[in-house]
Image: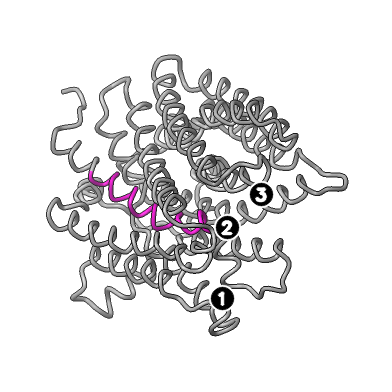
Amino acid sequence: MPKTLTKSDLKSLSLYSLGGALEFYNFIIFIFFANYISTSFFPSELDDFWKLLGTYTIFATGYLAKPFAKSIKNYFKTQFYYIKAQNLNIILIMLSTFSLAFIPTFESIGYFSLVILLFIRILQGLAISKEFTHAWSFVKRHSPDGKDGFCVSSVNVSMMAGVIFACLVTLAIHQYFVLEEIYAYAWRSPFIVGGFLSMLLLYFGKTLKQNFIIQKIQHNHQENFTFKDLFKSKKDFSKIVATMLLSWMLTACVIILTLLMPNFIPEVLILEKIDALLIQIIALVILSCGTLLAGIWVDKFGFLITAFIFAIGFSFSCFLYFYFFYAQILHLSIYCYFIACFFGGINALAPILICKIFNPDKDLTKITFSYNIAYAIAGFFTPQLVFILHSLAVKPDEPFIYGIFTYTLILSLMSLLIAIFTYKKLRL
């Protein structure tokens, strides 16, 4: 009997993706208001560079908290057994997001405001409950023959939906408030929106059984996998390292193209924030199309050919984009940004290959372990690294404009090499 996704499966998967998009909005909306947050939680006499670097570092701690989420949630479920797992996630999301809307600033309580901000950001990282690895495995197991690349890549698009919604909320705030009002109080508005979205998550979870997919994926017994198990099997070790490196590419690609570079557009290209947000929304749509097309091409032309095309295309387009961007050539930099976002569809190759080299029925814990560790490491240091490289590129004296490009080049070439090695040597 051919594999297929039933109507119930599609409904559950769509709901899971929607929940993931809403959670991702709560997680990343912080970065959209980094400039405003930096002025509210750091002393005014501090240089703007250190304010923003500190803000990006606090943002990055949310990624670092992700691998510890399961252990901490299990502890609370043991202590407060009457709280269901799904409700616990919603409570954490609501508390952390609403708290950001009402937290006192540096002017009110001094450096203690930074401690609270850091704690809330860590809480946000712990609150993210949606495992993309679960959805990848589910789709891989149930996708029709010859369509698994497209189906797996479509899961990544739900992540883009959360960023697009964050763009729309940010756009509305900049449309209806003047800059002084945003710096004073309006930057808190998207966190209030996020808190109410958390209530929607609770509604979806109760009425449409949002956790259905995870239950169905885990119908087979999944053995616990810990760090010490990493070295037990040479074959597993190679697969897990490959998964971590590919996940690094996925995480860094999303952070750089969709979250960080749009923040730099108004400063470098001398554009209004609203114009930069519109560019970002178009870029996200193009990135989503590139992600889906990468999956289609894997199904049609094979994995290695697709990986080669997207890795070379991503490297070359990023070179042109960063060159024109820091040369402040407006139209060429925007066109090349769109092209780079299209080839940013290389992010889809990570879950596609992961689902090829692992057995989704038996190896889900290994996939989740390796993805979460790479997600935490790459997510933690990429924002600060990219911000520092950007600061070097905009220096008035002897700017170094190739820093971020060098990072993306290393990632794309690494992905290509890992893809070749993994696909040829490890696939059963």
Q: Main secondary structure of the magenta part?
A: helix
Residue 114: mark: 1
Decide which of 367, 38 is in the foreground and name it: 38
**Nearer the viewer's eye, disc 3 or disc 1?**
1
Q: Which residue is mark 2?
A: 380
At 74% from the left and 51% from the top, the residue drawn is 391
Q: Quadrant of residue 191?
A: bottom left
Q: Which residue is mark 3?
A: 386
- Where does the magenta region start and end? 15-33
Amino acid of disc 1:
Leu
> Earlier along the polypeptide chain: callout 1 or callout 2?
1
Amino acid of disc 3:
Val
Gap between marks 3 and 1 measured at Cα: 22 Å
Q: Crowding at label 2, few (<14), some or many (≥20) Cα neighbours within 10 Å?
A: many
In reply to whether residue 26 is colored magenta, the answer given is yes
Q: Crowding at label 3, few (<14), some or many (≥20) Cα neighbours within 10 Å?
A: many
